[in-house]
Amino acid sequence: MKLMAFEKPLGELYDKIEQLKKLSRESDIDLSSEIEKIEQRAAAVREDIYHNLLPSQVVQIARHPNRPDSLSLFRLMSDDFIELHGDRAFGDDPSIVGGLGRIGDFRVVWLGHQKGHDTKENIRRNFGMPNPEGYRKALRLMQMADKLKMPIVTLIDTPGAYPGIEAEERGQAEAIARNLREMMGFGVPIVSVVIGEGGSGGALGIGVANRVYMLQNAVYSVISPEGCASILFRDAKQADVAAQSLKITAPDIVGLGIADGVIPEPLGGAHHDWDVVATAIKTQVLSDLSVLSSQSADQLRDDRYAKFRAMGIFTEG
């Protein structure tokens, strides 16, 4: 697995382990004790790195190309997931995916941003940046969920909505704004989980929920660190400084009252074990649906409204 820049000390140890294993095989010399010592050292280094991550390093993990995607998580959490397509007006946007499935005893509508794991797939998925038809597809599925009294579960992972001229011509701002309004009024439980990047209005377009969670190494922000650095410092290379100031990591977002909790990841990031991540998300979603499903439609609307109205409240001393 390709290591990130800050994992370089681990790479050197892993290389040394492989060299010793190769030498042991080729020369028929028992080097197991030496290999075990280096493996123990590598484990200690890895734990130290991941317990002292900088915000800029968390951003790298959130963007890792092997991080679990929405479609894969839907299928890991729901044995009978059926994908649905199209906004019934323009086309099918592959950067937002959704469909029907069962989680525990609940029939739910799944929605999520979809990135690719290689260049070809990323181009097809537009790097997880939806066009207006993606948000209109999401709205169509959410309206169906509201009509059939089915909970909605959304997985957020986008750098932001696509900013191209074609998207603007087809009503990008209106599509997102309409989703915000309509989601606030749905009478069914909505649970959202930021699984990678939560980028600005592109994330909020499917993120107005009764409960919002973040994976341990996910980020949630009004702008990317690179974009912030370009505006404030006129230098995108200052992204590390911007990431520190933006307060975009899961503990920061929970502390600000925007997210309700952090879902743990395997040591080293979610890309190391998709099954563990899917199980952790499923457990949290089922816990919330069990509570929220007992509330009336009006209670769910009031709960959602109060949650988002409370964001950004401050007092002057």
Image: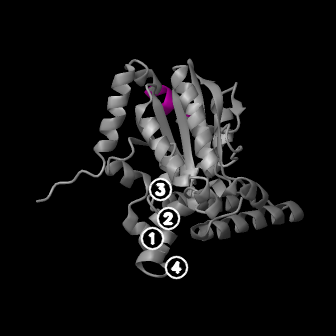
Residue at the extreme right of the image, as rendered: 26
* Residue 162 in the image, given as x and y percentages of width and height: 60, 58
- The residue shown at (48%, 68%) is 225
Label 2: which residue?
A: 224
Which amino acid type is shown beneath numbered disc 2?
Ser
| Secondary structure state at the residue bearing disc 4 | helix
- The residue shown at (44%, 28%) is 288
Give the magenta range.
282-288
Q: Is residue 31 left or right of residue 44?
A: right
Using the image as rendered, state which of residue 121 and residue 34 is in the foreground.
121
Upstream in sequence: badge 4 or badge 2:
2
- Kindly report which numbered mark, 2 or 3, lies closer to the viewer in this rendering: 3
Upstream in sequence: badge 4 or badge 3:
3
Label 3: which residue?
A: 200
* Residue 175 in the image, given as x and y percentages of width and height: 54, 47
| Secondary structure state at the residue bearing disc 2 | loop
On the question of residue 54 being in view, the answer is: no
Using the image as rendered, state which of residue 100 and residue 65 is in the foreground.
100
Upstream in sequence: badge 1 or badge 3:
3
Q: Which mark is residue 237?
A: 4
Could you tell me what secondary structure mostly forms the magenta stretch? Answer: helix
Quadrant containing the C terminus is: bottom left
Upstream in sequence: badge 1 or badge 4:
1
Label 1: which residue?
A: 228
Using the image as rendered, state which of residue 65 and residue 126 is in the foreground.
126
On the question of residue 156 being in view, the answer is: yes
| Secondary structure state at the residue bearing disc 3 | helix
